[in-house]
Image (cartoon, rainbow, N blue to C red):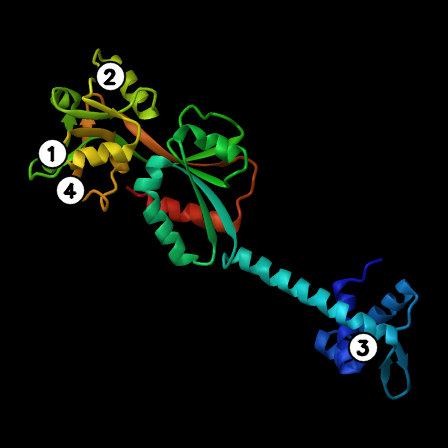
Amino acid sequence: MTPTIRQLEALVLVHRLGSVTKAAAELRVTQSAVSLLIRQIEENFRLKLFDRTTRALHPTPACNDAIPIAERILADANGLARHMRDLVEVKTGRIAVAVSAGVASALLPRVLAKYRVGYPDVRVELFDVAADELLSFVMGGSAELGIGSVENADTPEMKIETLMQSSLSAIGIRDGRFEKRSRLTWDEIGDGELIAMRRGTRIRSQIDEALSRTGRQLKPTFEVSLITTALALTADGVGISILPAHMLPKRQFPTLAAVPLSRPTIARHVSLVSRAGFVLSPAAHRFVEAARLGMQF
């Protein structure tokens, strides 16, 4: 039978201190308890570890050979215990987070910055993926958490929490008038130069479905595949982008403003995704808290 950690502690202390009494005091147990631990090792391996005289204990050659190994095992066990405590206290660890492209650009920086201040020694592995790949990425175990816009994800295998929502907005250049509008209607922007996401993207599909119910049709001047492309074009005066308000990274595009669109109002959500039934690591729990605070829009 493999010696227990307690038995090894008793063995090493008795060898180091040369006394059962001193070892017992160090372990805060009785002398008889220490003697029993040593005797259990000896009986288990049928190996004498100490020669006992009336005045002292003398380690046998077998004991001297075993001590370095016992010390390494105890050092490894103590190191493991420290590491486990650090994991619980989020002083170390690793998490993998998948984020959709829009979230990675507009929302993730402030969440990650907040998290790094509180937990600088946790390694965060980021995967920026297409929105359609987010669920499968988390489901497959490649990431512990996912953040992005998720639709039609009513499945018992996934846990989905809405972090924030905002309406689709007209995003244009701050000119002293545009940013002061409280809202715009789709009819008001219909004749302008519009930049929209390409057909087939989730944002565009949501727009087309909502407008079709009111007998309208979006006719953008330009269609793009990436949110950052739309914003860059708008920043250069090419046209007004139609995007969720939360997808405007204000530090990257300080000259732009988002004005909510109405009639109809179309809301977009950003959700936190994880696997149902899987316990999040302490580091991941703290990341969720940072995401909830950082995405208050």
Q: Residues within 10 Å of mark 3 (few under 14, many from 20)?
A: some
Q: Which residue is mark 2?
A: 211
Amino acid type, residue under disc 1 in the picture: Arg
Q: Residues within 10 Å of mark 4 (few under 14, many from 20)?
A: some
How many discs mark residues in the rendered view? 4
Determine the image quadrant of residue 165: top left
The spot of residue 225 in percent (x, y) is: 30, 28
- Residue at mark 4 to residue at mark 3: CA–CA distance: 77 Å
Q: Which residue is mark 1?
A: 181
Compared to 65, does 122 lie above or below?
Answer: above
Q: Nearer the viewer, mark 3 or mark 1?
A: 1
Distance from Cα at disc 3 to Cα at disc 1: 82 Å
Residue 30 image-quadrant placement: bottom right
Q: Nearer the viewer, mark 2 or mark 3?
A: 2
Q: Which residue is mark 4?
A: 255
Of circles 4 and 2, the one toward us is 4
Instruction: Tell which tag, 1 or 4, sits nearer the viewer.
Output: 4
Query: Residue at label 3?
Result: 31
Q: Is residue 182 above or below residue 72?
A: above
Quarter of the image where the N terminus is located: bottom right
Of the numbered discs 4 and 3, the one sitting upstream in the chain is: 3
Q: Name the foreground residue: 239 vs 259.
A: 239
